[in-house]
Image: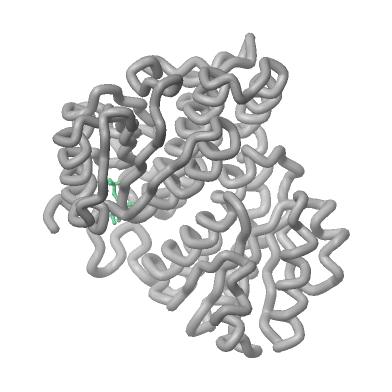
């Protein structure tokens, strides 16, 4: 099929907007919308009833998807997760054994370091699974089981729709692992799967915030630095937000766990420092509000991504609030990924950088 930008200015914009649809396609392969059960084809190969640990290795944005999955496997399946960037994992000489499941996440399925990590785990007898977008890729071929994302071809160098589809697959995997391991009851599973099924609809609502995000991005495009904060599964999203801003707009950005603010990044806060806080209202929201107050007290400019309840309880610490739909916890990192992508996209457009092909970056890094 001919791949074009449709009515969009860049592939990245098109791919961001495709997400409700492609997340839906991906979910329909991994969950049963009718019975509200996870139904991941080939899941037996992972041996979730027998394994002692899940190992995850990946690079770039795919690594951040893995970091989110760590929270999910631990919480929903009580499975310990070891995760590292593939360039470190492959050389660490970390012990890997036959009772472990090693999972590699890669849009292209060709990333050299990820492939080398896979081969290392295979040699050490682990079961091998892959979350890839390209079904005929090397990583897919060398895996015992492939969980394909149905994102369609991704052209923009900075990954967007592949990331949210990776998260959709990983969420379904963690929930089904939780059922297999007897951690989740039928009711809990059906509640979680019901939440996943709603994500395409939430994603449509999230995209409606684009005009405000574009306006915000224009004023932020003058900042030399930016900070992203989040807790729980939104911490990896803070890392992803910072990565995207760096890659696309060349603005220096860092992502931090909100609770680590005091351990360093607070020293950087002044009136020139935009701080993006990714914080749906949840059980630890009040802790994040304290962090925002610390930033506000030092003049930092806070852009808060939260829901209506979070906005009401934010203590007016934020300068700007992007109000997101009220989403269940498991859906949050997927739904909040969209405004995070839009911030970097629009900032880059204002900066006039090459959005689809940022300088020095490659879509697929097949050499070390
Ligand atoms: C490059 C791309 C990123 C991607 C990473 C991993 O850095 O620019 O967007 O996340 O590689 O690629 P993979 O194909 O393994 O997901």
Q: Is residue 316 left or right of residue 46?
A: right
Residue 343 sits in quarter: bottom right
Vertical side of 138 occupied by 237: above or below: below
Asked whether 326 or 8 is in front, the reply is 326
Q: Is residue 22 visible?
A: no
Residue lying at 82% horizontally and 59% vertically, measured from the top left: 311
Determine which quarter of the picture holds residue 189.
top right
Q: Is residue 97 left or right of residue 294?
A: left
Please identify the quadrant where the C terminus is shown: bottom left
Query: Which residue corresponds to the image point at 75% horizontal and 50% vertical from the top-left?
Result: 282
Nearest to the observer: residue 365 or residue 338 = 365
Which residue sits at x=48%, y=72%? 254
Quarter of the image where one finds residue 115: top left
Q: Position of residue 127 (x, y in %)?
A: 27, 27
User: How many labels, in total?
Assistant: 0
Q: Is residue 321 above or below residue 254?
A: above
Comparing 314 with 43, the one in front is 43
The N terminus lies in which quarter of the figure?
A: top left
Would residue 100 be found to the left or right of residue 273 on screen?
A: left
Q: Position of residue 206 (x, y in %)?
A: 65, 46
- Is any part of residue 273 visible from this angle? yes
Residue 20 position (above or below residue 191): below
Please provide percent x and percent y for residue 238.
Answer: 54, 61
Q: Is residue 104 left or right of residue 316?
A: left
Q: Is residue 364 above or below residue 255?
A: above
Q: Position of residue 355 (x, y in %)?
A: 37, 62
Residue at 26 percent across and 29 percent down: it is 98
Instruction: Name, please, the residue furthest toward the left.
Output: 367
Q: Closest to the observer: 293 or 243?
A: 293
Taking the view exactly as shown, the residue that stands out farthest to the top is 35
């Amino acid at each position: 099929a001919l791949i074009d930008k449709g009515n969009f200015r860049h592939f990245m914009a098109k791919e961001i907007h495709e997400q409700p649809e492609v997340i839906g396609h991906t979910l329909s392969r991994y969950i049963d919308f009718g019975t509200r059960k996870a139904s991941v084809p080939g899941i037996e190969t992972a041996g979730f009833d027998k394994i002692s640990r899940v190992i995850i290795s990946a690079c770039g944005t795919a690594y951040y998807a893995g970091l989110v999955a760590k929270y999910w496997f631990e919480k929903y399946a009580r499975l310990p997760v070891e995760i590292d960037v593939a360039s470190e994992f492959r050389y660490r000489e970390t012990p890997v054994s036959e009772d472990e499941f090693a999972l590699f996440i890669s849009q292209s399925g060709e990333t050299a370091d990820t492939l080398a990590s896979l081969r290392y785990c295979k040699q050490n007898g682990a079961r091998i699974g892959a979350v890839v977008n390209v079904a005929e890729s090397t990583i897919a071929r060398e895996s015992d089981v492939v969980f394909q994302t149905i994102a369609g071809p991704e052209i923009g160098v900075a990954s967007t729709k592949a990331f949210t589809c990776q998260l959709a697959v990983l969420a379904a995997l963690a929930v089904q692992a939780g059922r297999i391991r007897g951690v989740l009851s039928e009711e809990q599973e059906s509640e979680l799967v019901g939440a996943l099924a709603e994500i395409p609809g939430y994603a449509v609502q999230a995209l409606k915030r684009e005009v405000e995000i574009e306006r915000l991005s224009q004023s932020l495009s003058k900042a030399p630095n930016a900070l992203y904060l989040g807790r729980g599964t939104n911490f990896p999203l803070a890392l992803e937000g910072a990565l995207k801003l760096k890659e696309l707009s060349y603005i220096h950005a860092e992502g931090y766990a909100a609770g680590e603010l005091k351990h360093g990044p607070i020293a950087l806060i002044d009136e020139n420092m935009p701080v993006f806080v990714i914080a749906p209202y949840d059980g630890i929201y009040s802790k994040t509000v304290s962090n925002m107050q610390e930033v506000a007290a030092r003049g930092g400019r806070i852009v808060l991504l939260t829901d209506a309840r979070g906005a009401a309880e934010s203590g007016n610490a934020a300068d700007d609030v992007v109000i997101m739909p009220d989403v269940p916890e498991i859906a949050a990192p997927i739904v909040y990924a969209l405004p995070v992508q839009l911030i970097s996209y629009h900032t880059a457009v204002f900066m006039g950088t090459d959005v689809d092909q940022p300088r020095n970056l490659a879509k697929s890094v097949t050499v070390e």
